[in-house]
Image (tube, rainbow, N blue to C red):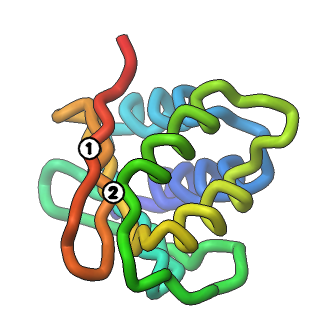
Amino acid sequence: MDAERITLAETCLHAAHSGSLSFPEIVGKLINAGFEGYTVDYRSNTQTYYLPDGESVGLDMPQPAIPVAAVFDAAEIARLVLWAQANPPDYSYAGFSTLAKAAGCAGYMVSFLGRRVVYFGRTAETHVEHFPN
């Protein structure tokens, strides 16, 4: 993967954690650069960005690695997504991630092509959220 795309992926990763860009803004930047999606792995504390030709880049997330709960609570994940979409003053990606892990979310896959996010637990249970129109 070329250095420009890697730099953009790093910028988007840090912008999510700092709150300087919203999820829709990050998605727009990544799509414009040719990415087709990314995966967040809370167990390895990494994020991997994918191009259509199979190239990828994995980056360490700048947050503490904490354990993922054993039981996946899809209703809590749905509530957390609504919280993130509303973007109230108390929202942060770090807070979202901590609460998602406590709700048993081991990670999630963002598909720009499919316009959805698939959240998954340690037992491969899933919760799907479609991008708003």
In front here: 15 or 108? 108
| Image coords of residue 100 (percent x, y) | 54, 63
Q: Is residue 94 above or below residue 65?
A: above
Image quarter (top left, top right, bottom left or bottom right) of the C terminus = top left
As helix, strand or loop, the secondary structure at mark 2 comes to: strand
Q: Residues within 10 Å of mark 2 (few under 14, many from 20)?
A: many
Q: How many numbered marks does the figure carry?
A: 2
Q: Are marks 2 and 1 in contact (CB under 8 Å)?
A: yes
Quarter of the view holding residue 107: bottom left
Instruction: Give the residue drawn at x 15%, y 62%.
Output: 54
Which numbered circle lies on residue 88?
none
In front here: 33 or 42? 42
Q: Residues within 10 Å of mark 1 (few under 14, many from 20)?
A: some
Which numbered circle lies on residue 128?
1
Instruction: Give the residue drawn at x 56%, y 45%.
Output: 80
Relative side of 8 to 93, left or right: left
Q: Amino acid at mark 1?
A: Val
Relative side of 78 to 114, left or right: right
